[in-house]
Image: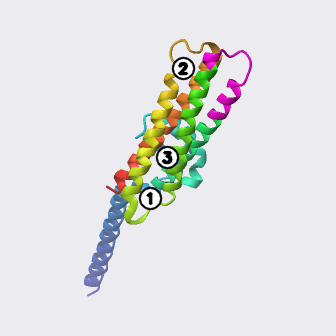
């Protein structure tokens, strides 16, 4: 009788152990299937930035905003647009200041003003996109995301046109290097923003 009782307890203990092991394995498999659950904000940004053309710039420009972004693809796209807008605005202001400085030829000043006009179109498009991003929910999601993609693509075209204005011999020396570098930075940031917006759109496809 006592032997049967011992065997019974042993069997119960063994079954409990099997159940716990199975449960543990199941939870582990669920966790592996959903890696975002345990992902930190910065890891989420780093992983998401891999879909962009300039992943290092993407991560460096957004990592300081990790607490605002969390692990939200929509907030990530929003913050990426914000960074692009802020950089476009500061670059435009810098170029206006340079254009009114001393030592610039009329041709160089003309190239500066043309580029500032292109950047003003960029700023307008990015602002519209940010406004629409804040309303991005509900049944109109697809329509709104398409509008955002169109506006950001147009902004990128404006930036490329601005960059082309500094090719060749329109401007030489250090000023050209600085200005062209800033415009390229704006273009690369906008390219990254568009890639993250496209990734967001694909989640709702």
Q: CA distance from mark 2 to mark 3?
A: 33 Å
Which residue occupies the foreground of this view, 44 or 20? 44
Q: CA distance from mark 3 to mark 1?
A: 14 Å
From the top left corner, tell me how far across and down residue 28 is, in percent: 36, 59
Residue highlighted by disc 2? 166
Q: Nearer the viewer, mark 3 or mark 1?
A: 3
Q: Secondary structure at mark 3?
A: helix
Mark number, residue 104: none
Q: Nearer the viewer, mark 2 or mark 3?
A: 2
Tell me where residue 19 sits by quadrant.
bottom left
Residue highlighted by disc 1? 37
Query: Vertically, is 27 above or below 1?
Result: above
Please report the residue visible at 34 percent of the width from the left and 51 percent of the height from the top: 202
Q: Which residues are magenta?
A: 92-108
Please report the residue visible at 38 percent of the width from the left and 51 percent of the height from the top: 146
Q: Residues within 10 Å of mark 2 (few under 14, many from 20)?
A: many
Q: Is residue 130 left or right of residue 108?
A: left
Q: Nearer the viewer, mark 2 or mark 1?
A: 2
Residue 71 visible here: no
Please report the residue visible at 45 percent of the width from the left and 53 percent of the height from the top: 73
From the top left corner, tell me how far across and down residue 116 is, in percent: 59, 31
Which residue occupies the foreground of this view, 89 or 170? 170
Residue highlighted by disc 3? 45
């Amino acid at each position: 009788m006592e032997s049967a009782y011992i065997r019974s307890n042993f069997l119960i203990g063994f079954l409990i152990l099997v159940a716990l092991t199975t449960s543990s394995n199941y939870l582990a498999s669920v966790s592996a299937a959903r890696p975002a659950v345990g992902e930190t904000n910065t890891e989420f940004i780093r992983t998401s930035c891999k879909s962009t053309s300039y992943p290092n710039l993407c991560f460096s420009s957004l990592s300081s905003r990790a607490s605002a972004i969390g692990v939200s693809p929509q907030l990530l796209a929003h913050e990426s647009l914000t960074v692009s807008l802020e950089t476009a605005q500061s670059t435009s202001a810098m170029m206006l200041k340079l254009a009114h400085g001393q030592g610039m030829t009329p041709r160089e000043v003309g190239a500066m003003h043309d580029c500032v006009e292109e950047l003003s179109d960029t700023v307008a498009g990015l602002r519209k996109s940010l406004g629409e991003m804040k309303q991005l929910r509900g049944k109109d999601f697809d329509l709104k995301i398409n509008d955002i993609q169109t506006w950001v693509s147009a902004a990128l075209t404006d930036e490329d046109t601005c960059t082309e204005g500094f090719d060749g011999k329109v401007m030489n020396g250090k000023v050209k290097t600085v200005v062209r570098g800033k415009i390229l930075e704006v273009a690369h940031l906008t390219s990254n923003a568009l890639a993250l917006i496209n990734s967001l759109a694909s989640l709702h496809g």
